[in-house]
């Protein structure tokens, strides 16, 4: 029998390193014996794998393992909180943000800045973002962390090369290769903000149901609350930068089949089937904001008419509420500023704002009904701006879903993201942590 090829041996080594690292991430601290039992390896085999992860700075030994185990306790293994970390950045229409997340999913540094990026060329925008990245890198290096990669979330269509923005209408960018403008170290790539928000949603930890959604008149909504997530999740505790923690509003994961909707000025979506992101032939799946809900309706920046974005996007809601979007941006800058203002007015009983939110929810429900009928997800998660406006938007979404689903007897779990507008930024950083978990041998080799 011939010996395995070097390539096969390398793939097996990489797989074993990944299995051991993920086992500690999911259930640590663990002894070597516990790791061996969880991943089905011999203790001798695990010892070699663990030693390599320790040398690479991915794991640390904490001393004697947990009490109550059979035999002599070994050293407990845990993820190194002074090892590799992932960097995430976000380019919004009116803000920039950067954060760093360690291997456990904990936010270790975060900075943000108001920035009017719409119709500004990418060069100056990326130059300012680079300054924020340097600030975060300096902070985490001071804590002993080493950034291994950077993902930048952008509200637009991203080519499969993970470098080119094919089209970002709300930024005014088209056919722009951001690769040469991004920092060379650590390695950088670009991702769609909705896809990255869905990744963060998968990592939410917790099993308790969310607080019930209340309708616009204060009565409880009838949105189904989801049960326990079907797969392990990574906690995202808040860091000193003020990012939200799932523990503040514990929410179960969305399951393995879900549709994540991310809304700010534009509206995007991500489709996850069997735990995997559905990207489509060109990587453009999920453009919910440009699904027509009024075929002969308002013209859209994409060139079409009657797109969902023109009825449920932030600026559409502001106009329907009798608020000038330009003035609102000046008076309530930054991500979430206008949303907080709308939520406050709705809570105070502003009839015009409540009507605008109800109509936006209705338009969103029409678009979602088509997506649900086509894809049959278990759950629909509303993120971004929709998370802050849930009490007034969700009941209208639910009504349209009830009217339009192909099987009136079926139910769809409709939830509001606990991460809100932070989802894409956290997802960007977590995608780099996932890359380490998938290929820890690359860190070991480095």
Image (tube, helix red, strand yellow):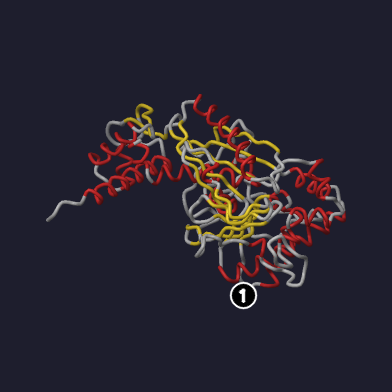
User: Label 1's element?
Assistant: loop
Residue in front for this viewpoint, 404 or 122? 122
Numbered-mark total: 1
Instruction: Tell me if residue 424 can be seen.
Output: yes
Q: Residue at x 74, y 59 (%)?
A: 312
Splitting the image into 4 quarters, where does residue 308 fall? Answer: bottom right
Q: Position of residue 97 (x, y in %)?
A: 62, 39
Q: Residue furthest top?
A: 142
The image shows residue 405 at horizontal and vertical percentages of 64, 72
The crowd level at tag 1 (other Cα within 10 Å; few <14, some 14-19, many 20+) is few
Q: Is residue 314 left or right of residue 122?
A: right
Quarter of the picture holding the C terminus: top left
Residue found at the very far left of the displayed protein: 1
Q: Residue 379 location, x and y as percent? A: 58, 60
Q: Residue at x 29, y 39 (%)?
A: 49
Residue at (47, 34) in percent of width and height: 147
Residue 417 x/y as whole percent: 63, 50
Residue hosting label 1: 407
Q: Is residue 165 above or below residue 144?
A: below
């Amino acid at each position: 029998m011939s010996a395995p090829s070097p390539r096969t041996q390398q793939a097996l080594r990489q797989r074993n390193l990944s299995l051991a690292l993920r086992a500690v991430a999911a259930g640590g601290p663990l002894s070597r014996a516990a790791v061996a039992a969880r991943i089905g390896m011999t203790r001798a085999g695990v010892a070699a794998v663990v030693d390599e992860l320790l040398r690479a700075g991915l794991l640390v030994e904490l001393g004697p393992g947990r009490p109550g185990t059979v035999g002599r306790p070994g050293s407990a293994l845990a993820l190194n909180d002074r090892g590799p970390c992932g960097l995430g950045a976000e380019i919004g229409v009116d803000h920039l943000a950067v954060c760093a997340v360690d291997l456990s999913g904990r936010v270790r540094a975060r900075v943000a800045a108001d920035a009017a990026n719409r119709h500004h060329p990418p060069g100056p925008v990326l130059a300012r973002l680079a300054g924020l990245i340097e600030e975060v890198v300096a902070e985490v290096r001071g804590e002993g962390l080493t950034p291994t990669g950077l993902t930048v979330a952008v509200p637009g269509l991203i080519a499969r090369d993970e470098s080119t923005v094919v089209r970002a209408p709300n930024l005014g960018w088209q056919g722009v290769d951001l690769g040469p403008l991004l920092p060379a170290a650590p390695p950088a790539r670009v991702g769609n903000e909705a896809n990255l928000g869905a990744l963060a949603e998968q990592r939410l930890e917790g099993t308790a149901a969310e607080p019930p959604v209340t309708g616009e008149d204060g009565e409880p909504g009838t949105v189904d609350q989801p049960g326990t997530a079907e797969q392990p999740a990574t906690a995202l505790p808040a860091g000193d930068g003020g990012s939200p923690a799932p523990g503040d509003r514990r929410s179960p994961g969305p399951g393995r089949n879900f549709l994540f909707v991310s809304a700010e000025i534009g509206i995007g979506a991500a489709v996850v089937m069997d735990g995997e992101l559905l990207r489509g032939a060109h990587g453009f799946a999920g453009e919910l904001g440009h699904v027509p809900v009024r075929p002969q309706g308002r013209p859209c920046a994409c060139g079409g008419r009657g797109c969902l974005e023109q009825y449920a996007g932030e600026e559409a809601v502001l106009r329907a509420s009798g608020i000038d979007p330009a003035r609102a941006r000046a008076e309530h800058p930054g991500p979430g500023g206008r949303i907080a203002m709308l939520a406050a007015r709705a809570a105070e009983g502003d009839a015009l704002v409540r009507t605008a939110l109800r109509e936006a929810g209705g338009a969103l429900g029409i678009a979602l009904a088509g997506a649900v009928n086509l894809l049959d997800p278990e759950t629909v998660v509303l993120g971004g701006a929709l998370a802050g406006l849930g009490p007034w938007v969700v009941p209208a979404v639910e009504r349209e879903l009830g009217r339009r689903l192909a099987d009136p007897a079926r139910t769809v779990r409709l939830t509001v993201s606990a991460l809100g507008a932070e989802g894409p930024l956290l997802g960007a950083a977590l995608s780099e942590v996932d890359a380490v978990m998938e290929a820890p041998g690359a860190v070991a080799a480095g």
